[in-house]
Amino acid sequence: MVFGIAYRMLGSVADAEDLVQDTWLRWSQVTGPVASPGGYLARTVTNLSLNRLDSAVVRRESYVGPWLPEPLVTEPDATDGVERAETVSLALLVVLESLSPLERAVFVLKEAFGFSYLEIAEALDRTEAACRQVGSRARAHVRARRPRYDAPPELRRRATDEFLAACVGGDLNRMLELLAPDVTSWNDGGGVITAALRPITGAEKVARFILGVLHKLGEDAGARPVLVNGEPGVLITVNGAVDSVSVLDFTEGPDGEPLISAIRAVRNPEKLAHLA
């Protein structure tokens, strides 16, 4: 729970792990009885996250190219997976970046972990009425910006696997069949590794860009399906080292089948170090 709150607040695996340690240190120094250990830990990590967000915002203002959260990657058949994937998807974490820190905290505690507004108010030192108002505003903001089409997991997996096969096989026509006409691709290289500095929009532009990247990676590149923040995704390796992690968003096509509406690819090696 502590890691989950910190990760959703910060979008960084490394920062979340740091705050787990900081929270544990504070917990280990408590000598008296604690009525609600879960509430105490949630309050502690939330406030530590709010403090950390100030410096995170400054870093992201000078970030080179699109910023994406650090991905959580598991095997496709993982039984534990990522708890409540709908509240931790890369798409949602990107939306949460546009919330104020207080809105983000209330949304995460309420929507992802089910805390009551009274508990949230106590954690954030606000009134219950104020937290309800903040929560309502945050939900409306997220609802207006998150994808409206939620394809069943089996369709997402099938479409992701078919797209991966088309990319690896260099089948441009099949790629175009699976991409929505207005698909957008975001590539996070952070200025550390070569990546598009602006979003790429349009099926043919996106498809040709992907084929160009795969061509540059050469014959030593490998691709395999994974779960990225609980959703079907793709992990690319070069000589066994992780090169990128991508996850797809979908929209409903004319025939009811899912079409890829967005591709988010993380290539910044600093954000992939935890996958080594």
Image (cartoon, rainbow, N blue to C red):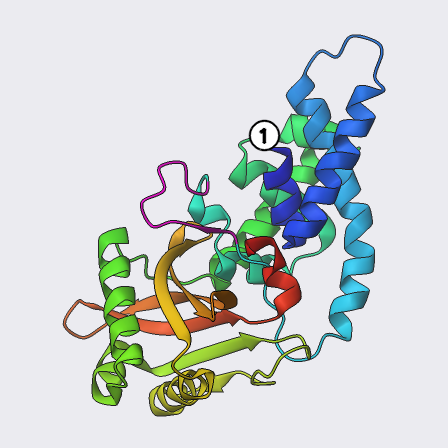
Image vertical order of residue 179 relative to residue 51, above or below: below
Q: Is residue 52 visible?
A: yes
Q: Residue at x 56, y 72 (%)?
A: 267
In the displayed structure image, the side of residue 240 where residue 123 appears, left or right: right
Is most of the magenta stretch helix, strand or loop? loop
Q: Based on the displayed image, in which of its 4 quarters is residue 5 positioned? A: top right
Q: Residue at x 62, y 62 (%)?
A: 271
The region drawn magenta spans: 72-82
Pick the front one: 106 or 276? 276
Q: Residue furthest top?
A: 33
Q: Is residue 126 visible?
A: no
Dot 1 surroundings within 10 Å: few (below 14), some, or many (20 or more)? some
Q: Residue at x 57, y 82 (%)?
A: 195
Q: Residue furthest left?
A: 255
Q: Residue at x 66, y 64 (%)?
A: 270
Q: Based on the displayed image, in which of its 4 quarters is residue 234 positioned? A: bottom left
Amino acid found under the numbered disc labelled 1: Phe
Q: According to the image, label 1 marks what residue?
A: 115
Which quadrant of the rendered structure holds the N terminus? Answer: top right
